[in-house]
Image (cartoon, helix red, strand yellow):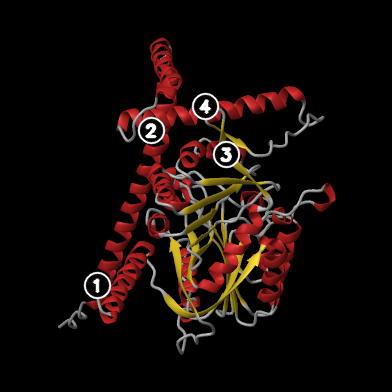
Amino acid sequence: MRSDATTAATQDFVRKLADQAFARSAGAPLIAGNSVQLLYDSSDNFPAWKQAIAAAEESVFIEMYIVANDRFGREIRQLLMDKAAAGVKVCLLYDWLGSWKASLGGFFRPLASAGAEVRAYNPPTLTGGLTLLGRNHRKLIVVDRQTAFISGLCISSSWEGQPQAGIAPWRDTGLALRGPLLAEALAAFADSWASCGPPLDAHWLDFPTPIAECGTIAARLIATTPSTAHMMRLDMLIASFARRTLWLTDAYFMGTSTYLSALKQAARDGVDVRLLVPRSSDIRWIATVSRTMYRPLLESGVRVFEWNGPMIHAKTAVADGRWARIGSTNLNISSWLANREIDVAIEDETVAGELAARFLQDLQQSTEVVLSGHKRTPVLTQPRQRQPPSFLLPAASHAARSSASAAARQAARIGDALGAVVRGTRSIDTSEAAAFLTIGLALLALAVLVLLFPWLVAGPLAFLLLVSGGAIVLKALGLYRRRNEKKQQLAATKNNLKPPAPPAG
């Protein structure tokens, strides 16, 4: 029989091992002494942002995917202009693709004229090539190096809905953070800022004394950059470590086969796995693709719910009532591998309990998806509301969109089936005979088209090679130029160090 001391020592060892696994997966240490306030929707987040910026005395650093030229965007711009004119350090880093309309429309020029520093992340360039696919998807505001706001919300009135048209605000979650973790948040901003130009002055990152603890919450700040996959590894780890519950809310769910397998295995092991996603999305095709993943999840015991409102944009996870994640990362490859994202992983029963309670509240405004019929087809427990034809959306167009959605779902199913055959990653069911027949016929038809019309392949391939080759050549020329400049600088330095020539005679 084991002694209490042996049991305690074992538990302590397991706890340390788990902490090491989390730290290595997230690429971030667990830091104690923080305070966290959960903020829901634009009704909580937007007033908190405005109040903090209006009260700023030293600095405002913003890293934001979308800054829109709308009512709320102009309101934030005016606050920042006022602060910059008053001598407050204002730095705004926006993503060019997310904010392209505002950027091309000159929205940021008045802000720069007022004294703020404004930079665009990854604007299109001749040497950029496919790097345009990697975006800065973070939503981070740091005020006076004392308070950080991290969320899924952007600086845009879209989150406020359209009350005059009866469109409810978007459902989203954010937080206000104070404490020692602020140093990590500021370092994350500085890293992104330096990727787009001269680095932030070092004194903004130097705190004369360690940031004082202002709470009891231990958390990790996970600031991912392209290809680090920190958040992907952490999400996989949480799916593996969850013992009782794992409740996920995601705006653009397109999990990889590996992540789907982790969720299915957790559900088979008795974990209460629930997934809340939008029923209608601002990016319609992503919601369509998400639905192609329902069947295997449902068959494994994962419960899937669709939000009844216009859009749920939150990216949250809560596990076992003691671990929570809030931030900008969606459960898809783009967020995991291509973008800059920022999330806070919290290890605190109070915060996790509040987020779990909010998740259950959200389920009351959602509809569960279940398997129905002898074919076990995923269906909603309540029918999806169909948008009636209108002057702007006639019946023919509505039917065309429905057909396009069906085609997208079929294409996704075909892709999954083809991957299963090529990789041999799962057994094939007889119900997939139609999908494989479609694959075979499609490949045969494609072969005939390529034989008859070779330009169908040659044209797009030549364009891709032209763009990629041109970008690489321009990049190489730039590197040659920089190398020559370094050589010239080195030669000039050596000449300055030579002793003066002796006088003549």
Ranked by sequence position, the earlier of labels 2 and 4 is 4
Inspect the image, locate mark 1, and give the three-letter code of the amino acid beneath it.
Answer: Asn
Question: Which of pointers 3 and 2 lies earlier in the amino acid sequence?
Answer: 3
Q: Where is mark 3, residue-wise? A: 370
Q: Quadrant of the N terminus?
A: bottom left
Q: Position of residue 285 (x, y in %)?
A: 58, 37
- Measuring 60% from the left and 27% from the top, which residue is drawn there? 404
Alpha carbon separation for disc pair 3 and 2: 46 Å
Residue 141 in view: no
- Give how far apart the Cα atoms at labels 2 and 1 are: 45 Å
Q: Secondary structure at mark 1?
A: helix
> In the rendered structure, which amino acid carries the disc numbered 4?
Lys
Which residue position is annotated with label 4?
375
Which is in the foreground here, disc 1 or disc 3? Answer: 3
Cα distance between the residues tagged 2 and 4: 45 Å
Total number of numbered discs in the rendering: 4
Which residue is pictured at 26% across the width and 67% down the height? 490
- Please state if 306 lies on the left or on the right of 394 as rendered: left
The label number, if any, that marks residue 495 in the structure image: 1
Mark 2 Cα shell of 10 Å, populated few (<14), some (14-19), many (≥20): few
- Identify the residue position indicated by label 2 in the image: 465
Question: Which of the 4 quarters of the picture holds residue 350?
Answer: bottom right
Q: Residue furthest right?
A: 164
**Nearer to us: label 2 or label 1:** 2
| Residue name at image x 51 percent, y 35 percent | 292
